[in-house]
Image (cartoon, helix red, strand yellow):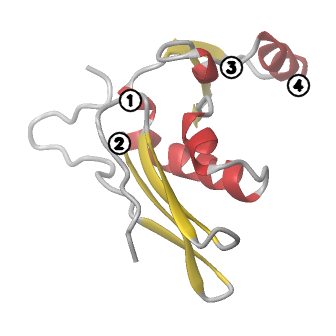
Amino acid sequence: VSGISKPGERHVTGQSPTILRKDGKVALVLGSAGERRITSAVTEVIHQVIDRGRGVRDAVYAPRWHWQGPQLALESGGAGKALGVSDETIDALKERGFAPQRYPSSPYWGRVQAVLWDPAKKEWTGAAHPRGTGASVAPTK
C-alpha cells in the first residue's frame, strides 16, 4: 500500500502542527495527517486562506494536488463536487507542459483540521477534513 512504511523504515513525517500569526496574534491553527502529502495539504489550505481569502471550511474542502518527483497528482471526485479538479484546470496544466494525473479522493490527500480567527466577529471557526475522520473544535476563549 502506498504511503505505508515497511518494517525497519521510518515514516517521512507523521504530524504537522502549524500556527500562523497576524499582528502578533494567533490567526490560523492547522495540521494534517497523510505522510508525504502533509506538506502539500497544509500549504494549500494556507494559500487558500491567505492568498485567496477563502473561509477555513472552503480552504479545507478545496481539491488537492501533490507534486512528487515527475508526478503531478490531482484529486478527482469522491466525497463531494468540491473535491474535484475541473476539466478546465486539467487542460490549462496540459497547455503549460504538465502531465497531470487524476486520482480518487481519499484520506491519503492529507486530512487537515483547522481553526481560523475572525477578528471582525471575534470568534474562531473550525473545519474538519471531509476525506477522513476527525474534527476541529474552536476554543471557547
As helix, strand or loop, the secondary structure at mark 2 comes to: helix
Identify the residue position indicated by label 3 in the image: 85
The residue at 17%/43% (across/down) is 9
Does residue 77 lie above or below 128 as drawn? above
Q: Is residue 51 left or right of residue 124?
A: right
Could you say which is closer to the camera, residue 91 or residue 67? 91
Residue placed farthest to the front in the image? 121
Ranked by sequence position, the earlier of labels 3 and 4 is 3
| Residue 102 picture location, percent across and down | 60, 13
Q: Nearer the viewer, residue 69 or 105?
A: 105
Up the image or down, 92 lies above or below 43; here it is above
- The location of residue 28, given as percent across then percent down, is 55, 66
Q: CA distance from mark 3 to mark 1?
A: 16 Å
Q: Given contact means CB atoms under 8 Å apart, are the residues at marks 2 and 1 in contact?
A: yes
Sort mark 2 into few (<14), some (14-19) or many (20+) by Cα contacts within 10 Å.
many
Tag shown at residue 35:
2
Query: Amino acid under label 1?
Result: Tyr
> Of the residues shown, which amino acid type is indicated by label 3?
Val
Q: Which residue is mark 4?
A: 96
Alpha-carbon span between mark 1 and mark 4: 27 Å
Q: Relative to residue 80, is residue 35 depicted above or below?
A: below
Q: What is the CA distance from the residue labelled 4 to the residue labelled 2?
A: 28 Å
- On residue 108, the disc is 1
Q: Earlier in the sequence, mark 4 or mark 2?
A: 2
Rendered image quadrant of residue 110: top left
